[in-house]
């Protein structure tokens, strides 16, 4: 699938075929894509625990639910529990930057050297950030979010449906034996969608002009209708929700799975 179409087809999928397993190679592909995401300090902050739903004890599956994550946890055959490694910067100790220097990604043209990494970047920026209890988790979350989105998009490119969703972090810590320095983020649920891939249409978003500015705050970014038209042809911008048959689809799904209407 073309990249723009992957972006366009992604929806938060909340109805999965509970009985259809996801091929192991697709899960690996998702995690390989995640590993390649850009990360600050090249420190690979994101950690993940890949879980097959059917290997979870029924009481553990129940315990992982929270008010915004209910039925979807039962329906998705694969769950990926994402964590941010709070020790990532300290573990890298600037070595990952030196590696980038050694492979020619960071160069003297831009002021880089091993000395600059040790004396300026590590000593003055990274070491203090990693020891700041407020800023370190923000850095870890930021970085992990970038990698999680790469996982999310790859799931759709593999023809699957996916959803990022909250989970009961306290229960998950005990069930999955998660170490203390792993900060809980979100779970990505994966499976073959039981709903149509359109899932009711592209979900509402504020107007582009209200979100992004040009030059300074308050000057809305100009939106060229010709570009919008092209993006529609490229299937990045799609029919907005609700498609006229969405209510019927949800009713049919409710009946198929014996759920409240
Ligand atoms: C970090 C994150 C956390 C989310 N948590 C939940 C959640 O707990 N439960 C849920 O049903 N959806 C969750 N979502 C999905 C959003 O509600 C979703 O983005 C929204 O419905 C917009 O629709 P779309 O993703 O289909 O474009 C989450 C999404 C993100 C990115």
Image (spheres, helix red, strand yellow):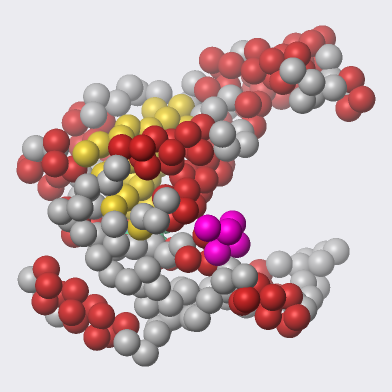
**Segment colored magenta:** 1-5
> What predominant SS class does the magenta segment belong to?
helix
Q: Is residue 81 above or below residue 233?
A: above
Q: Is residue 72 above or below residue 101?
A: below
Q: Is residue 187 above or below residue 254?
A: above
Q: Is residue 25 magenta?
A: no
- Residue found at x 24% / y 60%: 16
Q: Position of residue 68 (x, y in %)?
A: 28, 59
Quadrant containing the C terminus is: bottom left
With 102 as the anchor, is 34 left or right in this view?
left
- Residue found at x 61% / y 77%: 232
With 255 as the anchor, is 15 left or right in this view?
right
With 252 as the anchor, is 117 left or right in this view?
right
With 259 as the anchor, is 188 left or right in this view?
right
Q: Is residue 4 magenta?
A: yes
Q: Nearer the viewer, residue 233 or 33?
A: 233
């Amino acid at each position: 699938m073309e990249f723009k179409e992957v972006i366009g087809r992604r929806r938060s999928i909340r109805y999965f075929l509970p009985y259809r397993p996801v091929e192991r190679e697709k899960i690996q592909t998702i995690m390989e894509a995640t590993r390649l995401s850009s990360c600050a300090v090249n420190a690979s902050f994101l950690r993940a625990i890949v879980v097959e739903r059917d290997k979870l004890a029924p009481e553990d599956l129940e315990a992982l639910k929270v008010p915004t994550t209910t039925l979807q946890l039962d329906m998705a055959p694969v769950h990926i529990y994402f964590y941010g490694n709070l020790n990532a910067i300290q573990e890298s100790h600037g070595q990952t930057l030196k590696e980038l220097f050694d492979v020619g990604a960071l160069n003297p043209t831009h002021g880089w050297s091993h000395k600059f990494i040790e004396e300026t970047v590590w000593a003055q920026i990274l070491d203090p950030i990693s020891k700041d209890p407020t800023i370190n988790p923000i850095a870890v979350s930021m970085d992990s979010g970038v990698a999680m989105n790469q996982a999310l998009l790859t799931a759709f490119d593999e023809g699957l449906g996916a959803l990022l969703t909250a989970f009961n972090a306290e229960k998950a810590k005990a069930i999955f034996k998660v170490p203390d320095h792993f900060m809980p983020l979100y779970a990505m649920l994966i499976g073959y969608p039981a709903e149509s891939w359109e899932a009711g249409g592209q979900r509402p978003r504020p107007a582009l002009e209200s979100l992004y500015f040009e030059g300074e705050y308050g000057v809305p970014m100009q939106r060229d209708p010709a570009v919008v038209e092209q993006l529609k042809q490229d299937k990045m911008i799609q029919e907005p929700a609700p498609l006229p048959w969405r209510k019927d689809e949800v009713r049919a799904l409710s009946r198929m799975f014996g759920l409240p209407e």
